[in-house]
Image (tube, grey):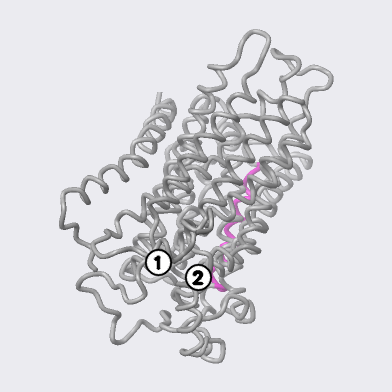
Amino acid sequence: MRPLSFLDRERTVAGPGFSRWMVPPAALCVHLCIGQAYAFSVFNLPMTRLIGISDSAPGDWKLQDLGWIFSLAIFFLGVSAAVFGRWVEEGGPRRAMFTAALCFGGGFLISAAGVYVHNIWVIYLGYGVLGGIGLGVGYISPVSTLIKWFPDRPGMATGMAIMGFGGGALIASPLSVWLMARFSTGSHIGVAETFIILGVVYFLFMMVGAVIVRVPAPDWQPAGWSPPARPRKLVTSANVYVYEALRTPQFWLIWWVLCLNVTAGIGVLGQASAMSQEMFPGKVSVVAAAGFVGLMSLFNMAGRFLWASASDLFGRKNTYFCFFILGTILYALVPNTGRLGSVGLFVLFFLVIISMYGGGFSTLPAYLRDMFGTRYVGAIHGLLLTAWSAAGVFGPVLVNYIRAYEIARGVPKADAYNVTMYVMAALLVVGFFCNLFISPVHERHHMPAVQGETARLAAQ
Amino acid sequence: MSSPNPTGTRTLQLILAWSFVGIPLLWGVLQTLRNALKLFQ
């Protein structure tokens, strides 16, 4: 027997009586860990004082150098999800989760070595490249498995997992702060020790998910459920091969739908604290702004589950229409909240906006399943996450540069975000039209039934 | 094969699996809510 044969897809096929409700916790084991990426910024300031301890000293790293760690990780998330998507799909979820655990946990351990020898390139390689690959492989690993277990509620199922990615930061942020405090002394900042603990804990936590995950047997269906006799217009029962999907206009329309929805959200997510203080000078303190950011994290997480679950009822296209119409209205109204001095309305608008940002991520896998079938949905999802990488650049750049431009031409800080809000609203209008043009994939892109069946059997 | 769980063991497995992910998540949510309350103080 091969030493790692327990990772094989055929070893993960569920036996009779296995409850499909064991699979969401397996997915959450991975997503709750890799969601740590959103909280990586808690290490930035401490890492600028590793030599000087109380203040930055000559030789200490600069914030702008440290910012590249997160950017690299998100870049490699998108790239690895795209490159390894097919391998993840065909190798099965356990092999992918194990690989993700090795990469993500290993990335932390290498980064700890980088902190110890004070070489930032080692951290770029550790957390940025290796950790980023762990993020990408881990992100897509449970998606198609969940969709196959929950053909009756694919939005809810994938929403649960992707909610975990939003929730991971809620755990990682206070945990990392506590660990750093625990290992810091008057002459030492405990970043390296925190990285080691997190690397080991995350590896073990993700391995629990890899052990309990199962794929359904080929003929399995939920009890009492059968595929609808007349499927919805935008829900296919055929499959599209992963690279054939790239040749369909639907893939690229959905790519822009995701990119524009994420661009609109990610830009303000990173600037929420500063924006709330600058739009309401004297009314929102630093502490209150931190509370606002915390609330946004909660709504980002909750939106991932609630919007994706709602899409099972209303359809994916309608759900995205809701994001684009409501988002446009809210973004266009945000400047008025500044003029009215209404902090409450400002907070309310952004909480709804950020819930739709999260919902955009979590509704996506089910949208892809509707358009391209279940066979290669994980791999196609991986390819589409490049839109996230692109939005990760567009969003913050748009917000930061427009604000800087407005201030440079004499606009008061309180009004410096108005143009940004209108630009975000305009992006969502473009997204609305991309979504509007999405129609069922033409039959010429479908895998022949025999080929699809052969491929499925070969993979299971 | 079906979704319902016929045995107590299966139910215990489900409780353990959901607790394993639910307890850390709940802790994170409570920590965040505690910080978020500062917005209203």
Q: Main secondary structure of the magenta part?
A: helix
For the residues tagged 2 and 1, is the chain the same? yes
Q: Secondary structure at mark 1?
A: helix
Q: Residue furthest top?
A: A186
Task: Identify which residue is drawn at 51% across, 27% down.
Answer: A283
Residue positioned most to the front? A1
Image quadrant where residue A275 sits? top right
Decide if residue A249 is in sight here. Answer: yes
Q: Which residue is mark 2?
A: A377
Q: Amino acid at mark 1?
A: Ile
**Tag 2: residue type?**
Val
Name which residue lies at 69% across and 25% down: A47
Label 2 lies in what chain?
A
Q: Quadrant of residue A387?
A: bottom right
Q: Earlier in the sequence, mark 2 or mark 1?
A: 1
The structure residue drawn at horizontal position 43% and vertical position 46%, both measured from the top left corner, is A29
> Is residue A12 or residue A150 the one in the foreground?
A12
Residue carrying label 1: A147
User: Which segment is the magenta one?
Assistant: A416-434
Q: Which mark is residue A312?
A: none
At which x and y percent is residue A32? Answer: 46, 44
Asked if A298 appears above or below A392 in the picture, the reply is: above
Q: Are marks 2 and 1 in contact (CB under 8 Å)?
A: yes
In the displayed structure, does residue A180 sit left or right of residue A416?
left
SS class, disc 2 = helix
